[in-house]
Amino acid sequence: MNFSIYAIVIGLPVLFTLVIVFGLRTRKKMFAKNLELKAADLWPQIQDARFELSGLLYGVWQDFSSTRLGMIVKDCRDQEVGKIIYRVARREWILIECSEGNFAANSNATMRLSISLRAASTEAGGSLCDFTRLAGGGYRFDAKSLGILESRSPRGLYLAPVFQYTLNGTPAGAGRPIGRWFARGRMLVLPNQLPLAIRLFVLAMQGQRS
């Protein structure tokens, strides 16, 4: 009996270590495959006659460090245009890096979830875009002078739901998860008149959507 207990005490940590190693290797392989995705493969899943391929952005999940998960974002030409980084337990919990600069999304102290996008170089700078979660699961982005961007969840249950976006009440684009059974990232099509930083912010918030 004592030998059995001893074997269990020794065996459990070994088994736990093997599970972790296997999980990390599987995760690394999956993230490597994510980088092989192409716009031509994704576009048919979100294509709509009203929207242009030139407005497509897609982000694939990657580990940037042991504490930073995020997405590498590419455009319709499969060119990397930015990075979205999620940080745990930070007020500035989303970082966005792109050609327009570096930006941070800050949580606001309000009753309803509210997040503001600002240039990372100055905490006192004005907000470029404010996100608010609406009743019923809708998303609202106030892009200041550009107007109001909104989306609502489709009715029914879907493994990879398509979220339709309107800009000032007019259909403007759509977004959806990449992958039906396994989450590989997010794709989004919005008009290029919206600054890249704001479109990346929309994609970042969509990445948190269930």
Image: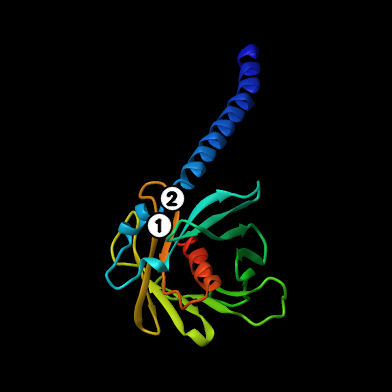
In the rendered image, residue 167, in percent from the top left (x then y), is placed at: 40, 80
Q: Residues within 10 Å of mark 2 (few under 14, many from 20)?
A: some
Say which residue appears at 65% left-offset and 13% top-offset.
2
Q: Is residue 58 above or below residue 113?
A: above
Q: Which quadrant of the figure has residue 186?
A: bottom left
Name the quarter where the C terminus is drawn. bottom left
The residue indicated by pointer 2 is 183
State how the image is colored: rainbow
Pointer 2 with pointer 1, Cβ within 8 A: yes
Q: Is residue 141 left or right of residue 181?
A: right
**Camera-nearest residue between 172 and 55:** 55
Distance between the Cα atoms at labels 2 and 1?
7 Å
The residue indicated by pointer 1 is 177
**Camera-nearest residue between 50 and 166:** 50
**Amino acid at circle 2:** Ala
**Amino acid at circle 1:** Pro
In the rendered image, residue 17, in percent from the top left (x then y), is placed at: 61, 29
Q: Is residue 155 left or right of residue 58?
A: left
Say which residue appears at 49% left-offset and 70% top-offset.
199
Q: Which quadrant of the figure has residue 116?
A: bottom right
Q: Residues within 10 Å of mark 1 (few under 14, many from 20)?
A: many
In the rendered image, residue 106, in percent from the top left (x then y), is placed at: 63, 71
